[in-house]
Image (tube, rainbow, N blue to C red):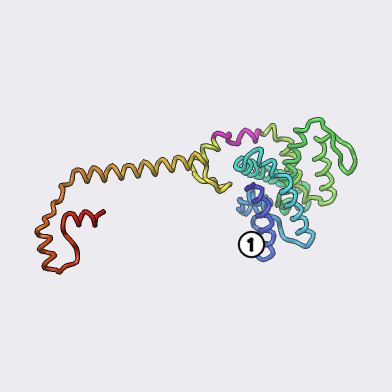
């Protein structure tokens, strides 16, 4: 599906391009960059996988493999347009919560007179979105059982244990994942699904736009409308032509003048009426 391909290819392309153009680092998000006016990072950070060593590149490939294996069934269930809108809304909500948490932690650090690292913590990549989706899916599973490295537990606790492990490994850098975890648990209360347009509105939008931007094919309803409009336009041209011809005076051909013109210019065409009719046919 289209959105799955985009979320797989774009982060990988940006990851490779980041080795050559350092300016692409402006796509990420931090409290410091937001204070300096890089507001677009609230949305663009989700597709920015920062370049690094070999381990970072392998991790980016692992994320791409996860997207290709997990996202197609979600896209087929929701549709490309709705999945794209849901991912964009979730990314914005997660990053806004991340900025709020970073601001509060920075404020507390300043109150204690401590050096604060929170303005420099960055949010980038698809990991926060993956944790958000995993949390929502685990909550929908209810009291179902799952395992974490062979340890049985309820599915609704699985994201918390996973982010806890990330916290032990990464320290303050895990703040975007904590924001995604919190937004996942607040998913039902935030009513993010209610903000998505209905299927009927999306279909109406595709009908007005014409060819689908995501699938690349023209919908049958739109193609039928275009064909009807072209047919009506052609019929109007034919009617106007017939009306013009019926109102125009018929031209009379003086054959004697034609014959005299033939004799003056030389032979070449048989201007007899019956010959003219045969030549016309």
Is residue 113 visible in this depiction of the protein? no
Q: Position of residue 92 (x, y in %)?
A: 64, 44
SS class, disc 1: helix
Q: Residue at x 66, y 54 (%)?
A: 9
Q: Nearer the viewer, residue 152 or 70?
A: 70
Q: Position of residue 68 (x, y in %)?
A: 71, 49
Quarter assignment of residue 55: bottom right
Quarter assignment of residue 279: bottom left
Q: Position of residue 238 (x, y in %)?
A: 30, 44
* 131 vs 125: above or below: above
* 22 vs 116: above or below: below
Answer whether residue 122 is magenta in the image. no
Q: Position of residue 196 (x, y in %)?
A: 60, 36
Task: Read off the residue under disc 1.
Answer: 23
Extent of the magenta region: 191-200
Q: Residue at x 68, y 52 (%)?
A: 8
Answer whether residue 198 is magenta in the image. yes
Residue at the extreme right = 150
Asked whether, in this view, residue 117 is left or right of residue 213, the answer is right
Q: Nearer the viewer, residue 243 or 38?
A: 243
Asked whether, in this view, residue 178 is left or right of residue 246, the answer is right
Number of residues whose C-alpha sits closer than 10 Å to that of mark 1, classed few (under 14), some (14–19) or many (20 or more)? few
Residue at the extreme top = 143
The number of callouts visible is: 1
Is residue 102 visible in this depiction of the protein? yes
Q: Residue at x 65, y 64 (%)?
A: 21
Q: Nearer the viewer, residue 226 or 208?
A: 226
Q: Nearer the viewer, residue 108 or 89?
A: 89
């Amino acid at each position: 599906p289209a959105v799955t391909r985009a979320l797989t290819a774009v982060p990988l392309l940006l990851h490779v391009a980041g080795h050559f153009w350092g300016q692409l680092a402006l796509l990420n998000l931090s409290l410091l960059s937001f204070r300096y006016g890089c507001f677009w990072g609230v949305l663009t950070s989700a597709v920015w996988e920062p370049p690094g060593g070999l381990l970072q590149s392998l991790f980016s490939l692992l994320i791409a493999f996860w997207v290709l294996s997990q996202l197609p069934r979600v896209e087929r269930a929701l549709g490309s347009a709705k999945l794209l809108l849901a991912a964009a809304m979730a990314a914005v909500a997660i990053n806004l919560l991340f900025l709020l948490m970073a601001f509060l932690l920075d404020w507390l650090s300043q109150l204690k007179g401590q050096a604060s690292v929170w303005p420099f913590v960055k949010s980038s990549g698809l990991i926060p979105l993956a944790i958000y989706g995993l949390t929502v899916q685990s909550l929908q599973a209810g009291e179902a059982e799952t395992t974490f490295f062979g340890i049985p537990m309820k599915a609704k606790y699985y994201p918390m244990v996973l982010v806890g492990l990330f916290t032990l490994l990464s320290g303050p850098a895990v703040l975007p994942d904590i924001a995604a975890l919190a937004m996942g648990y607040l998913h039902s209360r935030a009513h993010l699904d209610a903000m998505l347009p209905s299927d009927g509105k999306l279909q109406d939008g595709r009908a007005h736009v014409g060819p689908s931007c995501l699938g690349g094919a023209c919908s049958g309803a739109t193609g039928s409308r275009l064909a009807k409009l072209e047919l009506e336009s052609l019929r109007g041209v034919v009617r106007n032509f017939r009306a013009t011809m019926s109102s125009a005076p018929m031209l009379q051909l003086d054959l004697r003048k034609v014959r005299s013109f033939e004799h003056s210019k030389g032979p070449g065409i048989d201007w007899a009426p019956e010959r003219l009719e045969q030549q016309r046919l």
